[in-house]
């Protein structure tokens, strides 16, 4: 007979150091007060994924970044909308020369205004408008202009992120939306009756369009990134609340807490019982 010592971790929890099987993800649904449905990829949220920037991340460019300093910042950040850019601009204005390696570079690209200071994000040298009409953070020296390189006195990393930490504030409040959301993705599907079904899952290569095929490495696919001590729904609590709100997150966390406590005892049938 199987004993309690034979109990194993719940099958929805992928072992530490392994990438979840892409074909066997479990989902749970939570309904909100507006009648919309939130669908959560339990398999991913219970995994031990975490960002390994500066801890072996070779970046997503077509060739590996052996300096481990570029990460997924190689293309700059695409703003979701004008509000996203305006909010980022508010924090950019707080950056000092000590915090931001390329501050003087951005300032040299300012569109001159009365008084000399940029009054709108579009005037600031850190932002660039693409031919498509989209606004992004400017790419400088083959990566986002806010990315401090290894030769910066405080080391490599996002200037906005480190400045927020220095100020005792949340980096996700300072950075463009895409920078704190990735690699968690929110997909919204609206039916004929205007009812939304919102999927919370991991970003996949195809989500980036044709460009995703050019990544030589994508973290959600690699076992090196599945080495955190705690699961995604805990390590990315603030980000998930940013997506779904505190009430939905609390309902989600309650269910995932329960699954984490569960174990499964394998049952084997003896020849006499077959």
Image (spheres, rainbow, N blue to C red):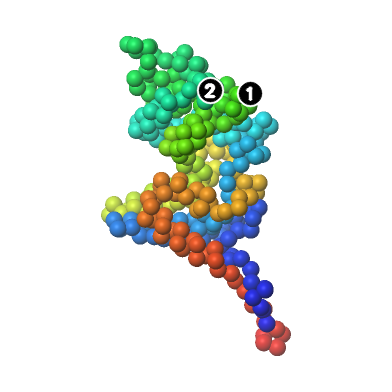
How far apart are labels 2 and 1 at the CA level? 13 Å
Label for residue 43?
none
Q: Is residue 11 left or right of residue 122?
A: right
Above or below, comparing residue 128 to residue 188 in the picture: above
Residue 81 figure quarter? top left
Q: Is the C-beta separation of discs 2 and 1 under 8 Å?
A: no
Number of dots carrying numbers: 2
Residue at 57% across / 31% down in the picture? 157
The residue labelled by disc 1 is 151
Seen at 50% across and 33% down, the residue is 166
Question: Is 6 on the left-hand or right-hand side of 208?
Answer: right
Look at the image and tell me whether residue 274 can be seen: yes
Q: Residue furthest right?
A: 271
Give the quadrant of residue 231.
bottom right
Secondary structure of the residue carrying tag 1 is loop
Indicate the quadrant containing the C terminus: top left, top right, bottom left or bottom right: bottom right
Foreground residue among 63 and 106: 106
Q: Say the numbered circle drawn on residue 98.
A: 2
- Select label 2 or label 1 by which is in front: 2
At 61% from the left and 66% from the top, the residue drawn is 9
Q: Is residue 147 above or below residue 39?
A: above
The percent coordinates of residue 30 (x first, y second) are 39, 60
Q: Secondary structure at mark 2?
A: loop
Q: Which residue of the protein is positioned furthest toward the bottom in this rendering? A: 272
Q: Residue at x 39, y 50 (%)?
A: 244
Q: Residues within 10 Å of mark 2 (few under 14, many from 20)?
A: few
Q: Is residue 135 visible?
A: no
10 Å neighbourhood of mark 1: few (<14), some, or many (≥20)?
few
Which quarter of the rendered picture does the N terminus lie within? Answer: bottom right
- Location of residue 190 in the rendering, given as x and y in whole percent from the top left corner: 34, 51
């Amino acid at each position: 007979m199987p004993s309690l010592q034979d109990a194993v971790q719940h099958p929805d929890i992928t072992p530490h150091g392994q990438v979840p099987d892409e074909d066997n993800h479990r989902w749970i649904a939570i309904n909100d007060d507006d009648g919309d449905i939130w669908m959560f990829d339990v398999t991913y949220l219970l995994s031990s994924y975490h960002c390994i920037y500066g801890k072996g991340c070779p970046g997503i460019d077509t060739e590996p970044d052996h300096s481990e300093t570029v990460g997924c910042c190689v293309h700059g950040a695409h703003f979701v909308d004008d509000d996203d850019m305006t909010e980022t601009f508010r924090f950019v204005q707080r950056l000092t020369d000590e915090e931001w390696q390329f501050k003087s570079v951005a300032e040299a690209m300012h569109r001159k205004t009365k008084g000399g200071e940029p009054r709108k994000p579009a005037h600031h040298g850190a932002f660039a408008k693409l031919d498509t009409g989209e606004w992004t953070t400017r790419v400088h020296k083959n990566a986002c202009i806010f990315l401090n390189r290894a030769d910066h006195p405080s080391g490599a990393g996002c200037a906005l992120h480190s400045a927020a930490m220095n100020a005792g504030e949340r980096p996700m409040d300072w950075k463009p939306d895409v920078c704190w959301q990735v690699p968690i993705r929110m997909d919204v599907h609206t039916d004929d009756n205007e009812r939304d079904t919102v999927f919370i899952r991991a970003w996949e290569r195809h989500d980036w369009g044709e460009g995703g095929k050019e990544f030589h490495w994508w973290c959600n696919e690699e076992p090196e990134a599945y080495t955190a001590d705690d699961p995604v729904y805990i390590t990315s609590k603030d980000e998930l609340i940013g997506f779904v709100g505190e009430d939905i997150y609390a309902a989600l966390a309650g269910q995932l807490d329960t699954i984490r406590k569960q174990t499964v005892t394998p049952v084997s049938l003896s020849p006499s019982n077959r």
